[in-house]
Amino acid sequence: MTRTVAPSVTCPARMPAMPRRILVVGGGAREHALAWRLAGEHGVESVLVAPGNDAIATVPRVTCVPARPSHGPEIAALAAREDVDLAVVGPEAPLAAGVADALRAAGVPTFGPSAAAARIETSKAFCREVADAAGIRMARGAAFTGAAEARALAAELARDGRGVVVKADGLMAGKGVFVCDDAAEAAAAVGGLLARTTDDEGPVVVVEERLSGREASVIAVCDGTVALPLPAARDHKRIGDGDTGPNTGGMGAYAPIPDLDDAAVARIVREFHMPALAELARRGTPFVGALYAGLMLTADGPVLLEFNARFGDPEVQVLLPLIATPLAPVLLAAALGRLDRAAVGASPAPGAAAGPAAPAGPAAIVADDAAAVGIVLASDGYPEAPVGGDEIHGLDAATAAGALLFHAGTERGADGAWRTKGGRAITVVGVGPELATARDVAERAAARISFRGLRRRHDIAAPAEVPA
Ligand code: AMP
Ligand code: GLY
């Protein structure tokens, strides 16, 4: 039983070659899920992960290599030495540091945008500029360098009583966003952010209207021109149940989400991803990689909160177990600019190695008719003051309960014991025919894992939280 997530059907006969050796850059739970998925695909011989982590190193056919993930020359030299057919860059920091550029310059087919294209995530001011130029719907707002102008807009937006959101321009690991109830709170947030930044070139703080609704993450695999969506997922960014407390990198996710069906996802890709791809290509910085639209589903329809330039974490931990289409050839086709543009009526990718002999990638990414729920277990003190070094118990029991465990901040000592390292430690993923059954697996498995100070949510995909 499969479900089509994109506008057409897959055509395995047109799949490009399977990459046999793959390099994944990064070492968190997202990269654990990617390595697990790619190494498990028929035809993939080995997956290198730089630097990976102790849990990733236990995956069959996966080897972790102690290279610096944000060091372009080091990663490019590793890819060349190991003769990889495809590199996949996971986190935002290496993308911002130009690791995808270094890999491409070394002739390695690479899934991940250039530093210039990744600015869509690394600068919220740039994201607003692209969205404006492309006619993409965003919250009303603007980017500022000066506190007085930023506070003036905050006061204006606060006048109708709906609240204001203040954001740092640059990368803040999900912690640079302040959702404020009134102008005074927003003014304090503006002051705090401007005091923290040393950059006196260009805008550093974004002020925008506060929207309400449920959030959704729509992530599409892109080759510069064409965007093929994965099913929509829902992350939970606040630390506490019922969306309370400070923002984090993400405390849990589920997919698919009942309030965005396949037709709605296809429409979002047409209205958000495709115009962004066209605008970035027009500027000479085509986007090749995972383009992630963080959306607020308002009463008036979806509105963009942010674009990310990579797969979501923890979203991809729940999405990869659901994808039926082989992922490795899709990512290679995207890296080569060869996703099937006939399916979406797009023109050839700029600079794509087209021609009669060039095999096209699939016309859609197909998902199983199933659901997945992921619960993040974070260390003591996360997100304000994370502490590591606590021994983790119950991992085998959680696996025996049927869950997939994707590790981020953990390590295994010489004594064989697993310990936290501070921050998000493990995503516990349950898969089942329905959200309720998937949640049951994830909850039962997560309950078996314990460590001092464990922080987690208990309402991920809870019946009262999931729209009918
Ligand atoms: P961002 O990094 O821009 O996605 O913001 C992180 C989180 O802050 C989002 O996932 C939302 O929960 C919240 N947020 C951001 N912008 C807005 C907005 N305009 N209105 C309401 N909440 C927002
Ligand atoms: N799940 C939020 C993010 O990946 O940015």
Image: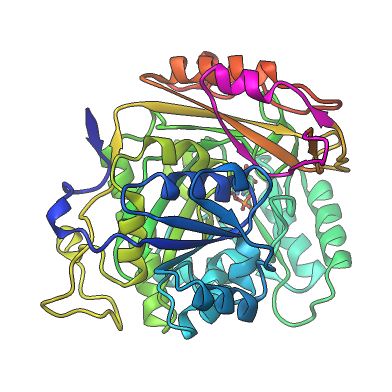
Give left or right: position of 237 versus 31: right
Asked if 418 appears above or below 348 in the picture, the reply is above
Q: Nearer the viewer, residue 357 or 466?
A: 357
Q: Nearer the viewer, residue 154 or 26?
A: 26
> From which residue to which does the magenta span run?
391-416
Q: Quadrant of the C terminus?
A: top left
Give left or right: position of 85 versus 364: right
Q: Position of residue 82 (x, y in %)?
A: 50, 71
Q: Position of residue 370 (x, y in %)?
A: 35, 26
Residue 414 within the segment the image draws in magenta? yes
> Can the viewer see residue 300 in this picture?
no
Asked if 182 appears above or below 21 in the picture, the reply is above
Q: Position of residue 239 (x, y in %)?
A: 73, 33
> Can the viewer see residue 362 in this picture?
yes
Q: Quadrant of the N terminus?
A: top left
Identified at 83% across, 69% down, the residue is 197
Identified at 85% across, 42% down, the residue is 386
Q: Position of residue 235 (x, y in %)?
A: 56, 37
Asked if 237 appears above or below 431 in the picture, the reply is below
Figure quadrant of residue 128: bottom right
- Residue sitting farthest toward the front: 415
Identified at 79% across, 32% down, the residue is 417
Figure quadrant of residue 201: bottom right
Which color scheme did the rendering employ for the protein? rainbow
Give left or right: position of 280 versus 97: left
Residue 28 within the segment the image draws in magenta? no
Give left or right: position of 92 versus 148: left
Q: Nearer the viewer, residue 402 or 121?
A: 402
Identified at 65% across, 66% down, the residue is 69
